[in-house]
Image: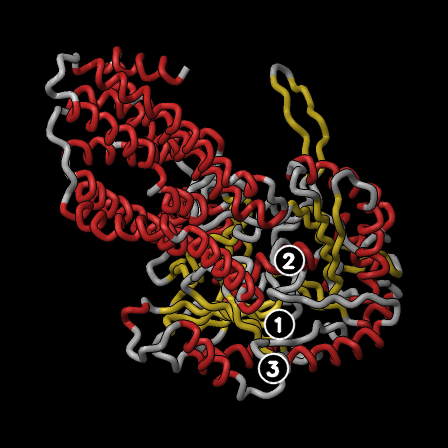
Amino acid sequence: MINQIIDFSLRQRMLVMIGAAVLVGAGYQAIRTLPVDAFPDVSPVLVQIMTESPGLAPEEVEQLVTFPVELSMNGLPGVTRIQSISMFGLSTVNVYFDDKTDIYFARQIVFERLQSAREDIPPGLGEPELGPITTGLGQVYQYLVTGDGVGVDSLRTIQDWIAKFQLRTVPGVTEVLSFGGTVKQYQVQLDPGRLIQYDITVPEVAAALERNNTNAGGSYLVRGAEEFLVRGLGLVTSLEDIRNVVVAVRANAPVYVRNLGEVAFGPQIRRGAVTVNGEGEQVAGIVLKRIFENTSAVIGGVKEKVSVINDALPSDIRLVPFYDQADLVSRAIETVRGALLEGGVLIVIILFVFLGNVRSALIVTAMLPASALLAFIIMRVTGLSANLMSLGGLAIGIGMMVDGGVVMVENVYRHLSEHTEENVPRATLIRRSAHEVGRPIVFAIVIIIVVFLPLFSFEGVEGKLFKPLAFTITYAMIGSLVFSLTLVPALCSLFLRAGKEKDTWIVRWIRQIYEPVLRWSLRRRKTLVGGAVAALVGSLTLVPLLGTEFVPALEEGSILFRATLAPSAGLDEGIRQATRMEEIVGEFPEILDAVSKIGRAEIGGDPEPVNNIETTVTLRPMEEWESGWDKAQLVAAMRDRLGEMPGIAFNFSQPIATRVDELLSGVRAQLAIKLFGDDLDTLVVKATQIQEVVAAIPGARDVQSEQTVGQ
């Protein structure tokens, strides 16, 4: 079979060349359309259920809302665990499924079970709904709605009714969250004295407003040759309409809403705010990418739409991004692209130096882009995205991709050189030499692929992280195998000529050193083997002394630190402290912007209490840093400076790393210790004791226990 492939390639050389040209075109198209991400999405298969219960305390939310929802989720196929958070006015239940479960199937069965959960929740306490279908990498674009002299209330209206609606039309966007400012409401501010005077209750007022705020259809009337639709118009369109709603009749006189209190515009009760650079409140928007979508394509569409929105808005109002995941993606891809380019150039130089023949080096070098392009085609077909791990596989395998070609070309060139004086046809020599090494090349490349088979057995987070690397290397090695048996023999028959084979100067120099060492080794076989075994045993004894880490932290180019205030802290206090923190952070010249999010956005975002502040710090390019620090030193300086603020616990991380940690473990940290028991007070005491012990361990930073009281 192997010899037949080689013979076909030598007989149909032009067909092989045409096939290679077609592959180049298909590979280029695959690169253009390949999904691009920063690194593999390790988020679990998760369905979030969120229920807003305005005004309800956490205890009631847990008992009346969260518990029925959790109970209804038990028994679903593929569920691995269920976690929940109950806080003032909000219930969040996270249902985790095993990695083999299709996310759309998971959402469907959860939605079906929610019907029974709704029946168990008392009326008026909220309607459970599914969260956005996104992942830990889903917050791909965040922006501020800014305007000179424009209040945050007006900016929030622009965000909700213009920017949000427009951005949701971008392909791949599943949701756009509004954060900060206040939502304008029609409010009826009832006077308790007047309610008593007219003997009217609050539910009666609410029922009257509901009855008088609806349209109705009345079929149609036929008049001669025409028919007319009948409608009953009752939707309120102004404050005056609300004032004129009749609530009841007392002493044969109607009692209007205006008789019971004031009707005016007012802000909705909010549980979140946004501050920027110590300059006060702003309004922000968070764009969520749908799962499995191309990150780069989504961000590109969002940027185009933002430009269109900015052109349509007044000149003094703009959407200004403060977090763009495209920057991280481009840096990650640029890093791998640079490594591939440098490796390719280095291999070309080494091939030329060691082979000593320009044509031989060029033939082997041609395998590099061909194998890589074939790998990109297979990645596109299988849906594998280009990211730091998958492209890293190409960088790792770039040296192995030329092994088969080197063996094939070197053997062909040797045969052509050794049989120059014999009357043997050139085509016969090339075919014979290719047959000699065809089978060893196949076995060698298969062995390389087999080495990576353990990576395919990984499951969970490690599988999502390392399988792309294994797949890419496998695809590239398959390309190397194919072209070693087809393209390389064809190119050898077209361009390689007979010549006197001689070692290059570097090979001669290496041989002068190697041959004496080889003779010495053969004379002292036992000593050499014993020394090798001793070195192996000695290296194994050093393993326990090595540090271990699951994977090096990805440098995202930005900082996210979390500040936890006292449990009783209110929203106004959170705004004040966030502004102070931004002022402190702004003192560092390496910082470009600091945007703080206090509490939570509308439903669909991260469920956080108002005593939680998350500040996203955008850094200037490191080449502009004049302090000479690296990022770790900058974080240490920020930690020391912010540590001067009393009563606040800080935790430093990065935006994506923080979200992924929380989705994987339910805790925004790399290491978490969980306690289980029936007595919450006892758990709090034990958690505090554990915190003190862990904080004393060398290397532990930002140690804190979860708050279980307050909001």
Circle 3 or circle 2, nearest the eye:
3
- Per the rendering, the mark at residue 648 is 3
Say left or right for 93 vs 313.
right
Mark on residue 612?
1
Which corner quadrant holds the C terminus?
Answer: bottom right
Q: Is residue 350 above or below residue 357?
A: below
Q: Which residue is mark 2?
A: 240
Disc with the residue nearer the chain's start (2 vs 1): 2
Q: Amino acid at mark 1?
A: Asn
User: Alpha-carbon distance for marks 2 and 1?
Assistant: 40 Å
Nearest the eye: 430 or 164: 430
Residue 407 position, x and y percent, is 29, 32
Which mark is in front, 2 or 1? 1
Q: Dot 3: within a 10 Å radius of its alpha carbon, few (fewer than 14), some, or many (20 or more) residues?
A: some
Mark 3 touching mark 2, by CB under 8 A? no
Tell me where residue 218 sits by quadrant.
top right
Of label 1 and label 3, which has the lower sequence position?
1
SS at circle 1: strand
Question: Element at badge 3?
Answer: loop
Report which quarter residue 686 is drawn in: bottom right
Amino acid type at circle 3 is: Ile
Q: Is residue 270 visible?
A: no
